[in-house]
Image (cartoon, rainbow, N blue to C red):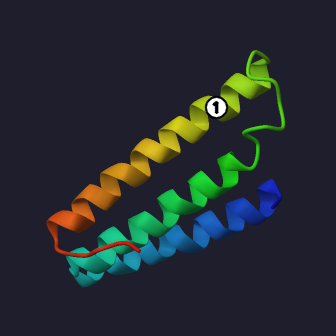
Amino acid sequence: MFLYDIYQEKCHALIENIKRAKNSGAKAAYEMACYDLADLKVQYYSQFENLHPECSTIGKFYNHQLGVALRERATVVDQLHDLGVEIS
């Protein structure tokens, strides 16, 4: 399990990577940087999946955030596939 502070630090670093990739104009590098951020979100919220009851307020919150992160990652994977980049 990694803590929220560590998660935030990693998010900030990945957002900087996204900015650099966007400024460089390399579409594949940009989408890959977006994938890294989306995957980090999935990893973070997945760790709470079985920690709290689904019917609790905090359980619902983490379940919702995980769903959002999974959809975000799926969207980025589709965009990478459109560019011919395969995620292993």
Residue 11 vs residue 55, the one in the foreground: 55
Residue 68 vs residue 55, the one in the foreground: 55
Most extreme residue toward the top, as rendered? 55
Is disc 1 placed on a helix, strand or loop? helix
Query: Can you say whether 65 is above or below 88 in the image?
Result: above
Query: Can you say whether 6 is above or below 46 in the image?
Result: below
7 left or right of 17 in image? right
Query: Can you say whether 46 is above or below 62 in the image?
Result: below
Question: Where, by quadrant of the figure, is residue 11 drawn?
Answer: bottom right
Considering the image in quadrants, where does the C terminus appear? bottom left
- Give the mark count: 1
> Which residue does the image show at 31% across and 80% down from the upper left?
29
Question: Where, by quadrant of the figure, is residue 59 drawn?
Answer: top right
Residue 37 vs residue 59, the one in the foreground: 59
Quickly name the residue at label 1.
Answer: 63
Percent coordinates x, y for residue 69 in the rendering? 51, 46
Most extreme residue toward the front, as rendered? 88
Question: Where, by quadrant of the figure, is residue 21 drawn?
Answer: bottom left
> Which residue does the image show at 76% across and 42% down from the upper left?
48
82 left or right of 59 in image? left
Percent coordinates x, y for residue 18 in the rendering? 41, 71
> Which residue does the image show at 58% across and 30% down from the upper left?
64
Residue 28 vs residue 17, the one in the foreground: 28
Percent coordinates x, y for residue 60 in the rendering? 68, 23
Considering the image in quadrants, where does the N terminus appear? bottom right
Question: Badge 1: how crowded within 10 Å, few (<14), some, or many (20+)?
Answer: some
Percent coordinates x, y for residue 12 in the rendering? 60, 67
Q: Please state which amino acid type lies under the numbered disc 1.
A: Asn
